[in-house]
Amino acid sequence: MGTPAVVDDDLRELIDELMNTGPEDEADDRDFEESMATVLSMVTDYLDDPDPPSPELADWAAAAESGAQKVADGLASRVENLRRGLSVFAGTGRPEEAVLRKHAAWTDARRAEAAGIASAARRLREKDLRSLAARGGLVNPRMAELIASVSDAMESDVRHGHVPSPAQLAEVERLEGRVAVASVRAILLKVKLTRGAAAFAGRPGEEALAQALRGHAAAAEAQLAAARAFAGALRRFRALSADANSNPTATRVHKRPSPETEDDLAAPPPRQRRRTLDSGVQD
């Protein structure tokens, strides 16, 4: 009996692939099935943990959700093709019918597992967002205040032509490294919180949660704005120093930092006892 005329080239290729599977293909399928079951069990266990997820686990959950959803979508497309083929061969008693039925059922089961992983990972990620929303001080206000204070001092020196000494310039440049690290973490935190707020905003009864996330995101943006101002002030501060060094006849007036600024630069703000940087809290 020939192949039914309604079988197109793509479906014929799929059927040929399935009809010619061997032991290695079956072993790969078993490995994939075991991997899916393991990941689903693992993310479910994490979700059942009463404690909020660690920053690392929250990042893993976001990646797992995205990856599992892509797998689920790909498998859903394959199930559709398998069922299309099965509709052609249904009731014929041909070998293709049994093979298509078997693979359609197996693939749909894996699709359901992938969708389950994506759903559980999403709930785990949302558990992290709920924990963050309920916490205070995700962005340490002392860091933003320190950045703003030093920026203002540098801008004042530039306006008045107070050329920094090498020691003063080095002191500010040491703070530059801390500002850079804080900025990267503030960017990541802002993106995470903003996306979380957008996701919760459309759900009934979740507006308070979305508002809390937006508030934390605004604090992160305020720190980023302070960091941008610091970067601009430091460029001008360096330019003032470079101009003075290139013109030996220029009058150099060194101005020490105010006692408050000097103390802040000499030692970092005290560390908080709660989990800090990795969960989005800035030193």
Image (spheres, rainbow, N blue to C red):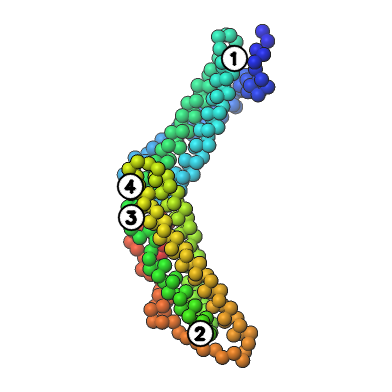
Kind of residue at disc 4: Asp
Q: Quadrant of the C terminus?
A: bottom left
Q: Report the residue at 50% width, 25% height from top.
A: 108
Residue indicated by mark 3: 135
Q: Report the residue at 42% width, 74% height from top.
A: 149
Q: Is residue 156 left or right of residue 13?
A: left
Decide which of 17, 157 is in the foreground and name it: 157
Disc 4 vs disc 3: which is toward the camera? 3
Kind of residue at disc 3: Arg
Disc 3 vs disc 2: which is toward the camera? 2
Q: Whole-percent x and y of residue 143?
A: 41, 67
Q: Whole-percent x and y of residue 5?
A: 67, 13
Q: How far apart are marks 3 and 2 (CA)?
A: 43 Å
Q: Whole-percent x and y of residue 63?
A: 49, 44
Q: Do the residues labelled 4 and 3 touch (CB within 8 Å)?
A: no
Residue indicated by mark 2: 160
The circle drawn on residue 88 is 1
Number of marks drawn: 4
User: Vertical placement of 113 versus 151: above or below?
Assistant: above
Q: Looking at the image, is mark 4 or mark 3 earlier in the sequence?
A: 4
Disc 1 vs disc 2: which is toward the camera? 2
Kind of residue at disc 1: Val
Q: Distance between the residues labelled 1 and 2?
A: 85 Å
Q: How crowded is mark 3: few (under 14 residues within 10 Å), some or many (20 or more)?
A: few
Kind of residue at disc 2: His
Q: Residues within 10 Å of mark 1 (few under 14, many from 20)?
A: some
Q: Distance between the residues labelled 4 and 3?
A: 14 Å
Q: Distance between the residues labelled 3 and 1?
A: 58 Å
